[in-house]
């Protein structure tokens, strides 16, 4: 039975997959939440969250370049702390991707169903069937499809930045120079540092999804070169897109008109399009949000299937899911991920009291756990890479200082979460989910079946 993944992804594929995963409804619908909390000072929150992401991804890049694996931070957690850690982080991330996949396809299908006057399950089923077929193709074909799919979102945001800049300058017909009028009306920090702290919670997970690049790197022609180039490009492009969009919204819209959005009509992006007198602004944003959600859903299917495959290769999931076909595609893992994604969609429609809110709150904090896992794994693995001569030209900056700074910043976010009821519930949900998975991992990795497979495989996690 073959368990090897094919290598066919190019750097441009990795770059666009990372951008596609990170640019979703959170940007188009959630941006106003942070601005309403902090005012123009929301930029500080984005800079802090962006700094954490840059540091985490650079640590991950060093480890991926030296030891490529589609299990990435799960594999490195195992290498650093033992099989139970790899099991816990691996299944935690898989759970997170499945739940995010369900949220994305549910949101997209609701928009599309309204266009055609059909039940939401119809476009959801069609989209999932199409994405399953796409994920069944050779990885280079998947990468090409996702490249063009995600490019739509990138082009839209680039166009928004140009349009917003022209509006601010008063270069469009019927507009005048806006300047800093809206900022001066409320001040840079209208709600003080408390507002910035609240905004930080709203934007902390905005950069989530970039880590998908390191999963896909194992299927690239040259992981060391590809992951370094892709991560560097994605980080700065995402930062530019997010901070640029937020800056223009803050400059163009009065503070009292900005808030959270439950649909496209309330999005601050739609408000800017209306300022430019663009007809059908709501419809345009609905289409953009639908594409954003569908593209992100597609990448979640890819990422979750590769993670499940890697877990199976390492003995942390049934061996059947480690199988790949003649093209190097883990077909069984794709099917399982899609089926669980559909089950999670059904869970949202069923919506049992308290359960769905609990699971979604757990998803919201999973990324912080992943950040901690990457940082602590790096602190263990970096000295090994140096001692064994495995370290490449892709290196973490100030490896004795910045990882600890990352841990401190992530810890600060957890402390902020504990200061309000919603945040405390989120921390509780994450703690319960992580605790249950960790207990399962501790039990499974002590079984005779696991120990036997572990001895046969020798160095595990490398593909």
Image (cartoon, grey):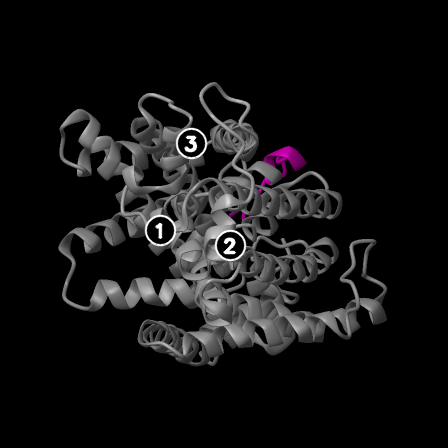
> How crowded is the residue under tag 2: few (<14 C-alpha within 10 Å), some, or many (20+)?
many
Which quadrant would residue 55 be assigned to in this image?
Answer: bottom right
Residue under the image location 26 percent in, 44 percent down = 106
User: Which residue is located at x 59 percent, y 72 percent?
Assistant: 409
Decide: is 397 above or below 414.
Answer: above
Task: State the residue position of label 1.
Answer: 256
Does 429 appear above or below 314?
below
Q: Is label 3 or label 2 in front? A: 2
Residue at left offset 47%, top offset 81%? 446
Residue drawn 20% across and 32% down?
A: 113
Residue 408 or residue 460, whichever sits in front: 408
Picture coordinates of residue 4 (x, y %)? 58, 46
Label 3 to label 2: alpha-carbon separation = 42 Å
Residue 87 locus on image (x, y percent): 48, 69
Q: Which residues are magenta?
A: 1-14
Residue 451 lies in the magenta-colored region: no
Q: Residue under circle 2? A: 40
- Residue 455, x across and y down, in percent: 59, 71
Label at residue 134: 3
């Amino acid at each position: 039975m073959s368990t090897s993944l094919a290598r066919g992804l190019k750097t441009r594929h990795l770059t666009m997959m990372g951008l596609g995963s990170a640019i979703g409804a959170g940007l188009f619908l959630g941006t106003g939440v942070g601005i309403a909390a902090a005012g123009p000072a929301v930029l500080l929150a984005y800079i802090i969250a962006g700094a954490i992401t840059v540091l985490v991804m650079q640590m991950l890049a060093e480890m991926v370049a030296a030891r490529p694996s589609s299990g990435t931070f799960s594999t490195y957690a195992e290498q650093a702390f033992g099989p139970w850690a790899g099991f816990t982080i691996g299944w935690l991330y898989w759970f997170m991707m499945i739940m995010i996949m369900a949220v994305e396809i549910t949101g997209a299908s609701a928009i599309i169903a309204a266009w055609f006057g059909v039940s939401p399950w119809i476009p959801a089923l069609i989209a999932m069937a199409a994405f399953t077929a796409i994920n069944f193709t050779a990885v280079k074909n998947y990468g090409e499809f996702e490249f063009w799919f995600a490019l739509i979102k990138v082009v839209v945001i680039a166009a928004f930045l140009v349009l917003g800049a022209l509006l601010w300058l008063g270069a469009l017909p019927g507009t005048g120079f806006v300047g800093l009028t809206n900022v001066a009306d409320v001040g840079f920090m209208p709600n003080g540092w408390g507002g910035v702290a609240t905004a930080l919670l709203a934007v902390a997970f905005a950069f989530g999804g970039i880590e998908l690049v390191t999963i896909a790197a194992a299927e690239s022609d040259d992981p060391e070169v590809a992951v370094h180039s892709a991560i560097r490009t994605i980080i700065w492009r995402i930062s530019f897109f997010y901070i640029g969009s937020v800056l223009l919204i803050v400059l163009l819209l009065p503070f009292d008109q900005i808030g959270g959005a439950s649909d496209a009509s309330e999005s601050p992006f739609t408000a800017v399009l209306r300022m430019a007198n663009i007809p059908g602004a709501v419809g345009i944003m609905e289409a953009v949000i639908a594409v954003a959600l569908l593209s992100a859903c597609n990448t979640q299917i890819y990422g979750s299937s590769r993670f499940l495959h890697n877990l199976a290769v390492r003995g942390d999931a049934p061996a059947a899911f480690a199988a790949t076909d003649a093209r190097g595609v883990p077909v069984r893992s794709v099917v399982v991920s899609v089926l669980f994604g559909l089950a999670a969609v059904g869970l949202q429609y069923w919506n049992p009291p308290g359960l769905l809110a609990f699971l979604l709150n757990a998803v919201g904090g999973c990324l912080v756990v992943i950040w901690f896992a990457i940082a602590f794994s790096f602190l263990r693995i970096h000295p090994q890479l140096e001692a064994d001569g495995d370290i490449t030209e892709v290196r973490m900056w100030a490896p004795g200082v910045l990882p600890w700074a990352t841990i401190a910043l992530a810890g600060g976010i957890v402390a902020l979460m504990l200061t309000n009821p919603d945040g405390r519930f989120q921390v509780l949900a994450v703690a319960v989910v992580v605790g249950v998975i960790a207990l399962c991992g501790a039990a499974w990795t002590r079984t005779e079946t696991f120990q036997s497979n572990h001895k046969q495989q020798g160095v595990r996690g490398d593909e």
